[in-house]
């Protein structure tokens, strides 16, 4: 091989090497850009998933708040049914009437429970809790200690953990 041919081959090899190096640099730059785009896409997906979860939680809270507000209008009916049952006539002819009122109350309670609304279970002797009870009176009482409930005057209700209506109670002091 002549020296001239050798120089031409060396020059061509050098050009090929430079082209290969340039292509490799372009490939590395393209891969770096692709990684950057992938990272950006993954961040956006995570951000959107967080946004969607937050909106779903806010909508669920709003739905619960609206449900609680709408249920409040039926609670006086429940109170009236309870008062009627607390003052049942002793006449045996009223037994069917009494059982009918009790059945209506039970159906209303089941309907409320189906919506995750429950009565706040209180009885005389329980400790007063201002978070879910409202004290109507604080009075001296020999049978109960300070801060204990003497009587539940009106049943309280809650939707899941949120108090819809606090119980009205008399408290011993």
Image (tube, rainbow, N blue to C red):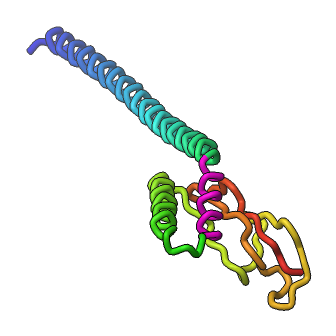
Q: Which residues are magenta?
A: 74-88
Percent of width and height locating residue 148: 78, 81
From where the camera sits, is residue 62 visible? Answer: yes
As for residue 143 lying within the magenta part, the answer is: no
Q: Nearer the viewer, residue 23 or 4?
A: 23
Q: Nearer the viewer, residue 140 or 64?
A: 140
Q: Main secondary structure of the magenta part?
A: helix
From where the camera sits, is residue 113 visible? Answer: no
Q: Is residue 171 above or below residue 164?
A: below
Question: Which residue is at a point 64% across and 57% down the rendered structure image?
Answer: 80
Locate the N terminus and report the quarter of the image it occupies. top left
Left of 98 or right of it: where is 123?
Answer: right
**Can you name the residue that lies furthest to the bottom here?**
142
Question: Which residue is at a point 53% across and 36% down the rendered structure image?
Answer: 55
Percent of width and height locating residue 87: 64, 69
Q: Is residue 29 above or below residue 77?
A: above
Q: Is residue 3 above or below residue 37?
A: above
Left of 76 or right of it: where is 56?
Answer: left
Question: Which residue is at a point 61% across and 52% down the rendered structure image?
Answer: 77
On the image, which quarter does residue 73 sit in?
top right
């Amino acid at each position: 091989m002549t020296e001239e041919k050798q120089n031409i081959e060396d020059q061509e090899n050098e050009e090929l090497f430079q082209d290969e190096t340039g292509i490799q640099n372009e490939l590395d730059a393209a891969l770096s850009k692709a990684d950057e785009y992938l990272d950006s896409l993954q961040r956006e997906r995570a951000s959107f998933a967080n946004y969607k979860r937050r909106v779903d939680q806010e909508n669920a809270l709003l739905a619960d708040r609206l449900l609680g507000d709408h249920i409040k209008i039926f609670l006086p009916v429940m109170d009236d049914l309870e008062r009627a049952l607390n003052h049942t006539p002793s006449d045996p002819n009223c037994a069917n009437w009494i059982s009918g009122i009790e059945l209506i109350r039970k159906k209303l309670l089941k309907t409320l429970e189906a919506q995750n609304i429950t009565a706040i279970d209180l009885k005389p002797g329980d400790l007063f809790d201002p978070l879910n009870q409202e004290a109507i009176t604080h009075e001296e009482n020999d049978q109960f200690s300070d801060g204990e409930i003497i009587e539940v005057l009106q049943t309280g209700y809650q939707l899941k953990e949120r108090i819809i209506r606090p119980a009205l109670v008399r408290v011993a002091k």
